[in-house]
Amino acid sequence: MARLRGPGGCPWDHEQTHQSLCEPLIDETAELLDTIDRADMEHMCEELGDVLLQVVFHAQIAEENGHFNFDDVARGINEKLIRRHPHVFGDVDLKDSDEVLKQWEAIKAEEKKNGPAENGLFKRLPPSLPALMFAGKVARQIHKKGLKHDQLPDPEGVDALAEGLEEEEAGEFLYQYVCACQQAGIDPETALRKHSSKLVSEIEGKAEHV
């Protein structure tokens, strides 16, 4: 990649920026997810390489601008994995994955104290997340923190819907809503994102006035 970006390299690679590579990163990630869904190991290997290329590409651009390099990226994630797994690399004893997740969140929270301050009740979510993922993360944060709002679904109703719910039935249910939205001229992705974002804004706004 240094050669491609360097003198006598590729004109297209020379022109790329972090911003111009956002769409290719999304495309390559989507192609990788497709191979995972199909359990296509041969092409999964290829697509993992394409995703790795995106990491290398961004690291090279950052190095050229004096920010960080690929070694810094690898070192950072290596240190994070060791730091967040004291039950493997240290002397902490944990019973199961639930305890591991609680410890992970506790360590992560401690790390955040030394980083940039995050305002509000909710952890900032990337706006480019698909709406279903965005809504799921919002719902998990609401549940985790025990937040209340009059527009949240009734817990008993959710429990009733969830009881015995299977993946195929859930998919059919969601698909029917997508079809209904299209018939009504509504973009379901936009509708769900707006509703989730509205909940976040209203819950945080209510908390500020308490």
Image (cartoon, grey):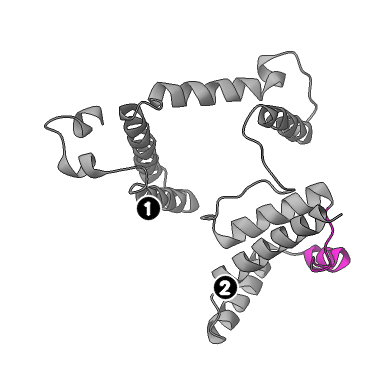
Measured from the top left, where is residue 74 in percent x and y? 46, 24
Measured from the top left, where is residue 175 in percent x and y? 59, 74
Is disc 2 placed on a helix, strand or loop? helix
Measured from the top left, where is residue 26 in percent x and y? 42, 51
Residue 57 numbered tag: none
Image quarter hosting the C terminus: bottom right
The magenta span reads 147-164
Residue with the most extreme top position: 91
Q: Is residue 87 above or below residue 187?
A: above
| Mark 2 or mark 1, earlier in chain | 1
- The amino acid sitting under disc 2 is Pro
- The amino acid sitting under disc 1 is Glu
Q: Is residue 106 above or below residue 189?
A: above
Image quarter hosting the N terminus: top left
Q: Who is closer to the viewer here, 78 or 164?
A: 78
Residue drawn at x 30%, y 28% is 64
- Badge 2, how many Cα within 10 Å: few under 14, some, many 20+? some
Q: Who is closer to the viewer here, 201 or 188?
A: 201
Q: Could you tell me how many numbered marks the image carries?
A: 2
Magenta-drawn stretch contains 133: no
Q: Is residue 50 left or right of residue 151?
A: left
Is disc 1 placed on a helix, strand or loop? helix
Residue 188 numbered tag: 2
Q: CA distance from mark 2 to mark 1?
A: 22 Å
Q: Is residue 140 left or right of residue 146?
A: left
- Badge 1, how many Cα within 10 Å: few under 14, some, many 20+? few
Location of mark 1 (residue) = 23
- Residue 157: which quarter of the image? bottom right
Residue with the most extreme left position: 8
Measured from the top left, where is residue 39 in percent x and y? 47, 48
Residue drawn at x 65%, y 59% is 135
Q: Is residue 119 left or right of residue 209?
A: left
